[in-house]
């Protein structure tokens, strides 16, 4: 017979501080949004990541010929936007084996950027409240140490 309590004790004692394990809504302090609002927000974030990737990364990853074909797919006005984007992604997946990994990395970068922007906004907002500003600055120090769970918890007490 095995001890059923050991695994849960281990997992509860080790809380991940990794950015990828944190809920974006917790990090940004928007936990009271409806599921629909959260879905819209996530769709918008996904679109920002996609547009940034197309604008800044695609030309670095493709040959001139591949890039020309990619642009041709993107300019196909006979398709709806989501169909066109789907075709662009399919094209890239054939050429870039680690496309998903690249996109996840870009999503993490945006997650960190948005969290640091929240900290910066709070520094401005609480500049005349020493106690709260101290908490905000503490959250910045936690972010610099990659303690993202603690960042969210600290900011969400303000």
Image: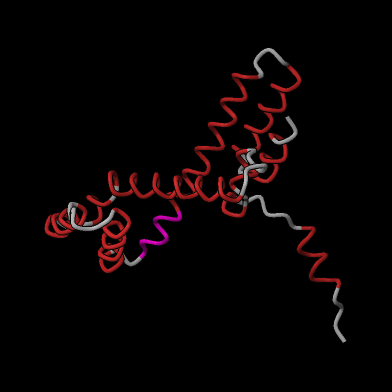
Principal SS element in the magenta part?
helix
- How many discs mark residues in the rendered view? 0
Q: Which residue is drawn at 67% across and 40% down?
A: 152
Q: Which residue is drawn at 15% across and 55% down?
A: 72
Q: Which of 126 and 33 is in front in this view?
A: 33
Report if residue 103 lies within the magenta region: yes
Q: Is residue 145 left or right of residue 56?
A: right
Quarter of the figure that contains the C terminus: top right
User: Which x, y percent locates residue 29?
Assistant: 64, 38
| Image quadrant where residue 14 sits | bottom right
User: Which x, y percent locates residue 134?
Assistant: 71, 23
What segment is highlighted magenta in the picture?
98-104
Q: In this view, does 107 lie to the left or right of 27?
A: left
Q: Is residue 49 left or right of residue 147?
A: left
- Residue reaching furthest top? 128
Report if residue 100 lies within the magenta region: yes
Residue 14's place in the image compared with 1, above or below, is above
| Image quadrant where residue 153 sits | top right
Quarter of the figure that contains the N terminus: bottom right
């Amino acid at each position: 017979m095995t001890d059923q309590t050991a695994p849960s004790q281990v997992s509860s004692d080790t809380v991940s501080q990794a950015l990828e394990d944190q809920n974006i809504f917790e990090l940004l302090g928007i936990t009271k949004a409806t599921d629909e609002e959260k879905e819209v927000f996530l769709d918008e974030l996904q679109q920002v990541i996609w547009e940034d990737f197309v604008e800044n990364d695609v030309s670095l990853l493709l040959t001139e010929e591949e890039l020309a074909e990619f642009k041709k797919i993107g300019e196909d006005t006979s398709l709806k936007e989501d169909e066109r984007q789907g075709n662009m992604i399919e094209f890239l997946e054939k050429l870039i084996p680690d496309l998903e990994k690249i996109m996840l990395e870009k999503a993490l970068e945006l997650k960190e950027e948005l969290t640091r922007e929240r900290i910066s906004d709070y520094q401005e907002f609480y500049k005349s409240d020493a106690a709260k500003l101290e908490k905000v600055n503490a959250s910045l120090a936690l972010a610099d140490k990659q303690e993202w769970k603690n960042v969210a918890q600290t900011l969400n007490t303000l």
